[in-house]
Structures are given as structure tokens and as C-alpha cells.
Image (cartoon, rainbow, N blue to C red):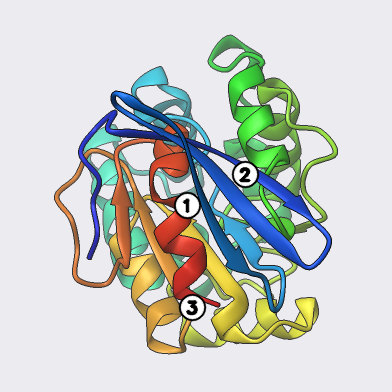
Amino acid sequence: MYRPDAGAVKATVATGGAGAAIASSVAGTPGIWYHWPVRDDPEWLFDLDNTLYPPENGLFGAVDARINEFLAAHLGVGGDAADTLRRRYHDQYGITLVGLMQEHGTEPQHYLDFVHHVPVGDFLGPDAALRELIGGLPGRRSIFTNGSRRHALAVVAALGLDGLFEEIFDIVALGFRPKPDPATYRTVLGRLGAEPGRAILLDDLARNLAPARDIGMRTVLVGPMAPSPVADFSIPTIQDLPSILPQLLTRGS
């Protein structure tokens, strides 16, 4: 797996016609251009929480707190027991909701409305640099999340990324089969009409990248954790994506 030295390379994408180019500025060597032929534009699949924004801002922690609150009220358990259940269901079923559906017959929409009723704008604000980065990527861009569409739209709007994503694949659209269920990845590719080799998945959880890599997708682990063998590339934050673009895009050509 490739992990760049932090800050070593800054790159922006330029696309046009039958080709694409990366204009990169390596420390002390500005204006180096990398060119490659583009046979098929890539399909970008972005995870949402802790991928499009860093975990330190606290938004996903607020969602976890809402999940614990729901579990405590719904199942009549204390706070510590609710937190333990949340973690077990997440590990066993992919997300807490599926554990509740499987073991308690919980109605999913009520759960989703409750746990994602958080003031997203208190945690996130418009990110012009991120909009420029994602908007400049060649190919089609979609959100691929285990959360709800409502939450995805709220996050995208708060970050100022409206209009950049063609599709939102949320847990409802996926038939409540969350990542890392292998069938879910093929469902997404099928709806996009894309071959695995054209798809690039960015996610903050290594376990969600493993099935994608197994079927031939390119994978990028986003976050400060140690590199993982299931990720083709690893970057500390989404803003570091330009540093791997030349290698990431040529690998799929």
C-alpha cells in the first residue's frame, strides 16, 4: 500500500477530452505534470461520516450519543448497557440498526429519524477547499453510507458540497444491508452500471474496504490510523487526496 509523506505533494485534477492530467507541485519543484490516458472515467464512492470530515469535530460522537439514548429508551436499559449494545451490534451486524431489527424487530425509520436528529450545522461549516477538490475529480461521484439519506444531505449541505454527488446510497436504498456486507458493493456497482475496476472507495473503516478490494475496486483508507493491507492507499484526511491522485488514477487505467 502507498502512503505519501505528509505535505510532500500537492495536486489538482484537470480533465478534458480523451485525457486527464495532474498538475503537481513537489516541494521545490513546481509545475511537474503527470499525464495518462483515461479509458473510462472513475466512479468515486465516498463514505460520509469521519471521511468527508474529521472525527475530531464531534458530529459522529453526537450521533453515537443519540443511538445510546434510543437504545436506553427502546430497550429499557441503562447508559452503560446501551453503549455496550451499540458497540456489539455495530461489530456483529455492521450497524446498530440492523442489530435492533434482527433481535428486537425495531421499525427502522423511527430509529433513523431519532438518531440523526442532530444539529449538523453546529459541527460542520462550508469547506471551499474540499468543494474545489471533490468538484475537480474526473468521473462521477456518489455517497455510499451506512447512515440515512437525510443525514447525508444534511452533512453535504453543511460542508457546502451541494450538487457534487450524483447518487446517495444510504442504508434504506441498500435494503438495510450495510457495509461490509459483500452483496452491498455489487448492488451499488450494479445501480451505477460500473465495473469494479472503475470504482474507487474512500472510507475511514478498514473493514469496509476489504470487500471492495476483494472484487477489484480501488480502496483508500481515510484517517490517522495505521495503514491497512486492505487499502491500496492511506491518507490522514480527505484533504490529502491530491497527494495520491497520480498513482490512484493510473492504477485503474
Is residue 165 visible in this depiction of the protein? yes
Is disc 3 placed on a helix, strand or loop? loop
Q: Nearer the viewer, residue 146 or 45?
A: 45
Q: Earlier in the sequence, mark 2 or mark 1?
A: 2
Q: Residue at x 30, y 38 (%)?
A: 236
Is disc 1 placed on a helix, strand or loop? helix
Which residue lies under the disc numbered 2? 13
Q: Quadrant of the rendered structure where residue 9 is?
A: top left
Tell me where residue 149 appears, x and y as whole percent. 74, 49
Specify the amino acid type for callout 3.
Met
Q: Is residue 229 left or right of residue 130?
A: left
Q: CA distance from mark 3 to mark 2?
A: 21 Å
Specify the amino acid type for callout 2.
Val
Q: Nearer the viewer, residue 41 or 56?
A: 41
Q: Is residue 225 left or right of residue 125?
A: left
Q: Residue at x 46, y 55 (%)?
A: 246
Q: Is residue 161 above or below residue 17?
A: above
Which residue lies under the disc numbered 1? 245
Q: Is residue 10 above or below residue 204?
A: above
Q: Is residue 113 left or right of residue 253?
A: right
Tell me where residue 248 appears, x and y as whole percent. 44, 62
Mark 1 Cα shell of 10 Å, populated few (<14), some (14-19), many (≥20): many
Q: Is there a contact, CB below 8 Å, between mark 3 and mark 2? A: no
Tell me where residue 30 appears, x and y as whole percent. 42, 28
Q: Earlier in the sequence, mark 3 or mark 2?
A: 2
Specify the amino acid type for callout 1.
Leu
Mark 2 Cα shell of 10 Å, populated few (<14), some (14-19), many (≥20): some
Q: Quadrant of the rendered structure where residue 161 is?
A: top right
Q: Residue at x 24, y 32 (%)?
A: 6
Q: Is there a contact, CB below 8 Å, between mark 2 and mark 1? A: yes
Which residue lies under the disc numbered 3? 217
Is disc 2 placed on a helix, strand or loop? strand
